[in-house]
């Protein structure tokens, strides 16, 4: 058996207990329907229409369950195909779906390279998978082939700099324990970790913790037999060879190099002279903390990210209530946000607080009207709200999908 397949049969990842579905829903990015609408369907999708999605390499089901549950919540007639090579992972994902009574999912045990044989999909989720394929480029191409016209993909791949220390240690552990049975590999790896020199880059890297959470986490991080990270440049190239282009990396503001540079006109001018994807590559090199890249992508030329210039656009906040955010902005003129070891400050005009407080199912035009602003005045007042909040993936536009 292929060693990657053997790994996920032995250690389904991430480690999940289906009984926990009764207590909580795991939410994240990509694949939240409001986000899908915002990044791929211009915020205008009619969710009463059928929606076909593929979760490629669905594992134990985190993205799958969130997507299926949220689509069920908004009454979307969805058909979701889960595909994975690991039958052990599939069993966990199926049990989670059963606990929730989700009936929109078809479970398939297959290689994602066979995705096009399962029809065309409006949306494809593929998180933490392509970097484990023997030929990832074929995986990017297979998913693109399975994409319906106008559809899009939500991807996560590993990134190198935030995983500093992982790759030398993977190599060291392969030399030491690579031939052992998986449980013995885990036991010995733990012994090695206990005595790893403080100077080792893995010991120094405070961004990584998966190895402490579960055996599956340790195996996935440090004992993987096939794992290649992607820089921004690598990822843009991999997408391009499949005919795809990024719509947005998440969170977009983290990919702005000016966030990591001194306020200096000469430096700013140099940054502005750099091509957009190279600027993002520069941000990745300067930040140093990116462990993964999450990206929404579509066929080149088909990008349809929602825009605040549409009066009918309906803004929705993620992870924070409009009233709470409005209070914070009114009192402090912004807030701080921690992300992988870095703290970002988001400044917002205190006068924008009532506009933020009005978010919640109303269109921009309605918000403008209630605030007594004409469209021009509203657009000027809304611009910093849009910029700051979409920059950190806290604001999306979706007319019909709610949170
Ligand atoms: C790290 S897990 C990620 C699971 C899930 N996507 C998530 O984000 O929680 C990787 C999954 O990809 C699956 N996988 C690896 N190669 C595959 C392939 N060629 N086709 C289908 N699934 C694959 C593995 O079996 C494993 O369940």
Image (cartoon, rainbow, N blue to C red):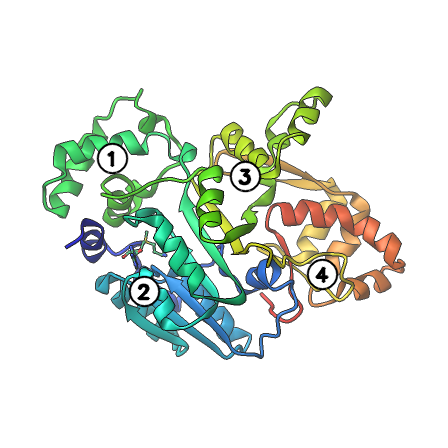
Distance in Å between CA atoms under marks 1 and 4 = 47 Å
Q: In which quarter of the image is the C terminus?
A: bottom right
**Who's the residue at 78% across and 51% down the image?**
382
Residue 237 seen in the figure: yes
Give the mark toward the camera: 2 or 1: 2
Question: Does the image show residue 327?
Answer: no
The residue that label 2 is drawn on is 114
Q: Does the CB distance between marks 3 and 2 fall below 8 Å?
A: no
Q: In this view, does 380 lie to the left or right of 247?
A: right
Q: Residue under circle 3?
A: 338
- Tell me, for residue 359, which label it has, or none: 4
Q: What element carries label 1?
A: helix
Contact, CB < 8 Å: mark 1 with mark 3? no
Q: Observer-nearest residue: 186 or 358?
A: 186
Residue found 37% across the figure and 61% down from its top: 56
Q: What element carries label 2?
A: helix
């Amino acid at each position: 058996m292929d060693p990657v397949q053997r790994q996920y049969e032995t250690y389904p990842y991430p480690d999940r207990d289906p009984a926990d579905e009764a207590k909580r829903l795991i939410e994240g990015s990509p694949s939240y329907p409001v986000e899908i609408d915002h990044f791929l369907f211009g915020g205008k999708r009619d969710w009463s229409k059928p929606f076909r999605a593929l979760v490629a390499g669905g594992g134990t089901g985190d993205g799958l369950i969130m997507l299926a549950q949220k689509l069920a919540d908004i009454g979307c007639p969805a058909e979701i195909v889960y595909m994975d090579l690991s039958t052990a992972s599939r069993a966990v994902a199926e049990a989670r779906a059963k606990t929730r009574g989700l009936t929109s999912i078809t479970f398939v045990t297959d290689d994602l390279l066979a995705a096009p044989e399962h029809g065309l999909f409006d949306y494809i989720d593929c998180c933490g998978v392509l970097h484990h394929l023997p030929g990832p480029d074929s995986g990017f191409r297979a998913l693109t082939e399975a994409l319906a016209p106008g559809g899009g993909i939500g991807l996560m791949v590993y990134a190198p700099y935030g995983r500093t220390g992982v790759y030398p240690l993977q190599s060291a552990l392969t030399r030491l324990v690579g031939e052992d049975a998986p449980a013995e590999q885990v036991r010995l790896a733990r012994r090695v970790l206990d005595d790893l020199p403080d100077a080792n880059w893995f010991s120094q890297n405070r961004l990584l913790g998966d190895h402490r959470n579960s055996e599956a986490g340790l195996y996935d991080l440090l004992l993987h037999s096939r794992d290649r990270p992607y820089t921004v440049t690598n990822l843009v190239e991999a997408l391009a060879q499949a005919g795809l282009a990024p719509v947005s990396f998440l969170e977009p503001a983290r990919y702005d190099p000016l966030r990591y540079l001194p306020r200096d006109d000469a430096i700013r001018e140099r940054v502005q002279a750099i091509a957009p994807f190279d600027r993002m590559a520069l941000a990745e090199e300067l930040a140093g903390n990116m462990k993964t890249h999450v990206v929404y992508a579509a066929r080149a030329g088909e990008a349809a990210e929602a825009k605040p210039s549409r009066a009918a656009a309906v803004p929705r906040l993620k992870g924070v209530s409009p009233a709470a955010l409005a209070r914070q902005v009114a009192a402090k003129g912004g807030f701080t946000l921690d992300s992988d070891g870095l703290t970002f400050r988001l400044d917002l005009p205190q006068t924008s607080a009532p506009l933020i407080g009005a978010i919640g199912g109303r269109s921009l035009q309605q918000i403008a009207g209630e605030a007594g602003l004409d469209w021009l005045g509203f657009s000027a007042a809304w611009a910093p709200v849009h910029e700051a909040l979409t920059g950190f993936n806290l604001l999306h536009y979706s007319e019909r999908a709610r949170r």
